Image (spheres, rainbow, N blue to C red):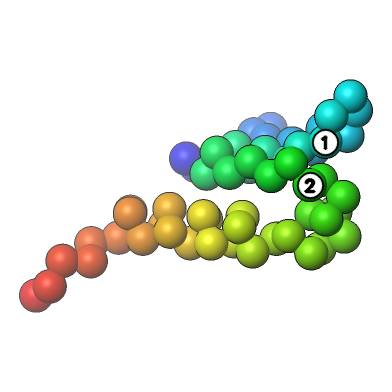
Amino acid sequence: KSIEWGSQIRSYVLHPYKMVNDHRTETKINDADAVLEGKKLNPFIKAYLLEGEKDRDVSPV
């Protein structure tokens, strides 16, 4: 998905439940506090990088 003006990349729900949703990769984590503290960012980074691999041509030459 392309990022354009006004598009939402990630949403943080802190009440009544806690969840972080990355709208680019549809990655969801239920530990919002850990994400906000920078402790659980790797799942978002990995999903984003894997999403980018799909867009590139990785076939052998």
Residue at 43% in and 59% down: 50
Q: Is residue 20 above or below residue 54?
A: above
**Which residue is under mark 2?**
31
Q: Are marks 2 and 1 in contact (CB under 8 Å)?
A: yes
Residue 24 visible in image: no
The residue sitting at 84% across, 29% down in the picture is 17
Secondary structure at badge 1 equals loop
Q: Please say if 7 is above or below 22.
A: above
Amino acid type for the residue under numbered disc 2? Asp
Q: Is residue 28 left or right of residue 46?
A: right
Earlier-in-chain disc, 2 versus 1: 1
Residue annotated with mark 1: 18
**Gap in Å between the C-alphas at discs 2 and 1?**
6 Å
Question: Residue 61: x, y in percent?
Answer: 9, 75
Q: Is residue 35 left or right of residue 16?
A: left
Instruction: Determine if residue 54 is in view.
Output: yes
Is residue 19 shown above or below 54? above
Quarter residue 3 falls in: top right
Label 2: few (<14), some or many (≥20) within 10 Å? Answer: some
Query: Residue farthest to the bottom?
Result: 61
